[in-house]
Amino acid sequence: MPQSRGTFAELHDNLDRSVYTLLGKEYKEIKPKWREIYKIKTSQKRSELVLTVTGMGDVPEKGEGQPYTTDIIQAGFPKEYIHTEFGMMFEVTQTALEDDRYDVLSEYAKWLMFSARIVEEKRAALPFINGFTTEQSPDGVSIFNATHVLKGGGTARNQLTVASNLSWTSLQQALTDWQRETKFEAGQFMQPAEDLILYVPPELEFTAHRIVASTGLPGSADNDVNSIKSLRNITVIKNVYLTDTNAWFLLTKNKSHGFCSYTRVPMSMEPAMTDPRTRNRLYPVRFRRSWGNSWWQNSFGTAGA
């Protein structure tokens, strides 16, 4: 006896509920690495325009009975986050529907959500991968650059003068340069936080841990103290999607480093559809998001030698 339209509708309803449950479960179980780095905000617009500010100059001495000196905070450089739309769907055949192939649905849901997570990871890595070349900071130069333009006049840098591979010496130099060479828009020296992230590709993970976690100076037989460990609290975070095997980065741990992601549309399961030609069931998912950097001063990097 052929199945009635009501029976098919009931089958679809039951299947849809199962698929949406699976998709949500798989998405939550795949832990995103990039969220450890980025500050995440929501957006209600096509794009978000972030405007930095210059801050103020030094407070001057004031003579008795003399008027106060006036200073104003000026607009800095703008950074626009343009949201990108992502979407994909999987197809369940009518035969699989009829046979109640829950195992097939489970595999489809798992791989679709895995694909969505991977895309997020790859896109979030781009501001670092291209951070020395095409990925721009608000002042119009690359995020990690030796000639950042300051609104108050002059330039500053947040990369090593000579690109260097990760070592105890190069990390010490980066920590020193970050304080001496990176400045606020009004020209004051930075005071980077002592709680930091050392962001590295897999090839540098073990080197990074030896440098920041050893009590003694790595590679020394003189029992010297590892001053990087004693003076800084550095957490190593590895990301397999950092494709340059020599580049490494320092970031403030409190996410004040300017790397930001805007969620315009969160990962969402769109209403299922039936293909009229095949009677197969289609399950689409989509999201809209952007990634970038709008405050270069609280990050420091080098492309490596």
Image (cartoon, grey):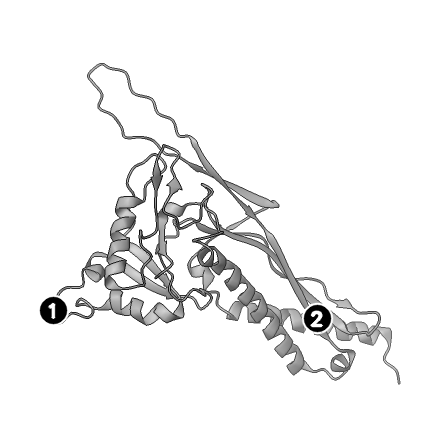
In the image, farthest residue toward the top: 65
Image coordinates for residue 141, horizontal then vertical, percent: 45, 45
Which of the two residues, 95 or 259, is positioned nearer the viewer here? 259
Mark number displayed over residue 246: none
> Measured along the vertical axis of the image, is residue 247 above or below residue 294?
below
Image coordinates for residue 284, horizontal then vertical, percent: 69, 65
Left or right of 237? Residue 89 is right
Secondary structure category for the residue under label 1 = loop
> Which quarter of the figure has residue 200?
bottom left
Quadrant of the frame with the N terminus: bottom right
Q: Judge the density around disc 2: few (<14), some (14-19), many (≥20) Cα neighbours within 10 Å.
A: some
Dot 1 amino acid type: Asn
Residue drawn 31% across the image and 53% down it? 160
> Which quarter of the figure has residue 280?
bottom right
Mark number displayed over residue 16: 2
Q: Is residue 181 visible?
A: yes
* Nearer-N-terminus badge (2/1): 2
Quadrant of the frame with the C terminus: bottom left
Image coordinates for residue 92, horizontal then vertical, percent: 72, 76
Mark number displayed over residue 223: 1
Secondary structure category for the residue under label 2 = helix
Residue drawn 36% across the image and 55% down it? 301
> Measured along the vertical axis of the image, is residue 72 above or below residue 65?
below
How many numbered markers are drawn? 2
Image coordinates for residue 201, horizontal then vertical, percent: 40, 67
Q: CA distance from mark 2 to mark 1?
A: 64 Å
Residue drawn 37% across the image and 37% down it? 185
Dot 2 amino acid type: Asp
> Which quarter of the figure has residue 128?
bottom left
Left or right of 17? Residue 5 is right
Left or right of 84? Residue 274 is right
